[in-house]
Amino acid sequence: MAPLKVLICGGGCAGTSVAFWLARSGHHVTIVERFPALRASGAQIDIRGQGIQVLKRMGLLETIRSKLVDEAGVSLVDSQGNIKATILANKSGQGAQSLTSEYEIMRVDLIRVLYDATKDDVEYIFGKTVESFDQDQNEKDVIVHFSDGQTSRYDMLVGADGQGSHIRKAILPSHADPVKRLGLYLAYWFVPRAETDNNIRKVYHVPSGMVMSRTHSLTEGQAYFGLRDDSSNELRSLPRASTEAQKEFWSQRFRGAGWQTDRLIDGMQTDDFYCQEVVQIHTDTWSKGRVVLLGDAVYCPSPITGMGTTGAFVGAYVLAGEINRNSQDLPLAFANYDKTLRPFVDKIQKFNPTLLRLGYPNTQWGITVLHLIAGPLSFRIPYLIARFSPAEKAGWRLPDYPELKYAV
């Protein structure tokens, strides 16, 4: 197998993971990342099911385990901070994860692990991105034009540049709209840890809204505000507004709402502030010629599924496996990647809109009902999950690719 010259656009979990596998297989891999350095930011994320299996095959699971956030579960609280229900993490080692995964980690720590595992074999170029690209008529290589004016040729290009992917826009028909809106909006930022904080995530509901607080260190925590509204033009345009305008909107919407909302709002004066519309990405087109999409760029399941990071790891593993099996016929490799992975993607993108409405009740009465239902059930949930649910999401088995030279 002749080594391929591979360019990956995007240095997140998906991009660095596929780089790990391809470089281990002897390919020449370059990652181009638009940020000027490795991103030392991002919220807490989790790894579930088949994603844990992939990390084990990468030989990184114990390193990841040493950097996990201590989060034992999640509690629903009322406006006075009274606990109405607590759902503990399933840490039995059997069955699926609960609302809190056994593998909770800060994004920056996960990216650092992946970077350290690849930096000696992968070329990283920061502060630069793909401006455009062309494929010659015979599709024998990809001619990439970078944001700094340089041009280079590669055997293939991987678009791992997130849900707003420019690579995806370039290969999809102009009329295509892969974005599925869920009517949900989130803001999250870092706040100083309070004396009352512990290793239980707290969730407080207001009509059509949610406030969440969790901690990840002895000095710092995270604040999340969420709103469910599928008709507001103001909300739809909010992610494109200035950071100050975003902070003003969320502050006005939640100030005085009860529990610890005012404390969390006072902690908004930070540069680590993010605002996003929660969406999924659905498209029939995963590749074109020698260009292929990966992760959130092509099948973003949205944060509410808890499967985005797992989807990135699994997708990178399958893509690298198919490339190694068909390195001389990349269109076939990409077709097999689609055929193999799509059933898994269909499962992780599936969710019941009714559950979203239950999680964001419209009225105070709805919130009371949620608390009444969740309270008695919460103590049994971890046991029931461990006893009756499979660890593999939706029963989809991770395929074997011995060519990838597993660590274990």
Image (cartoon, grey):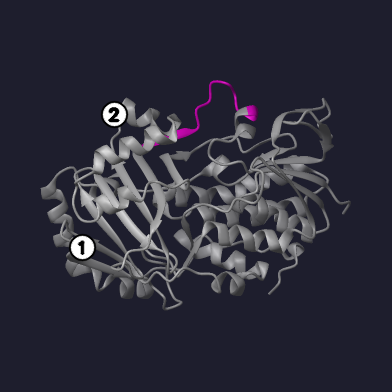
Which residue is denoted by mark 2 in the rendering?
231
Which residue is denoted by mark 1 in the rendering?
374
Q: Is residue 343 left or right of residue 132?
A: left
Callout 1: helix, strand or loop? helix
**Residue 302 makes an appearance in the image:** yes
- In which quadrant of the rendered view does residue 10 lie? top right
Q: Quadrant of the N terminus?
A: bottom right
User: In this view of the protein, which residue sits in the foreground, 198 or 50?
Assistant: 198
User: In this view of the protein, which residue sits in the foreground, 380 or 138?
Assistant: 380
In the rendered image, the residue lying farthest to the bottom is 92
Residue appearing at x 28%, y 35% in the figure: 229
Circle 2 packing at 10 Å, graded few (<14), some (14-19), many (20+), is few
**Residue 352 makes an appearance in the image:** no
Q: Residue 80: percent from the left, percent from the top? A: 15, 60
User: In this view of the protein, which residue sits in the foreground, 269 or 301?
Assistant: 269
| 8 vs 288: above or below | below
| 267 vs 89: above or below | above
Residue appearing at x 61%, y 57% in the figure: 111
Sequence order check, earlier mark of 1 and 2: 2
Gap between marks 1 and 2 measured at Cα: 29 Å
Residue appearing at x 23%, y 42% in the figure: 208
Q: Residue 210: percent from the left, percent from the top? A: 27, 49
- In which quadrant of the rendered view does residue 184 lie? top left
In the rendered image, the residue lying farthest to the right is 2
User: Is residue 53 located in the magenta-colored stretch of the structure?
Assistant: no
Q: Is residue 405 left or right of residue 275?
A: right
Q: Residue 399: percent from the left, percent from the top? A: 62, 61
Report the magenta residues as a range. Answer: 170-182
- In which quadrant of the rendered view does residue 293 lie? top right
- The amino acid marked with disc number 2 is Ser
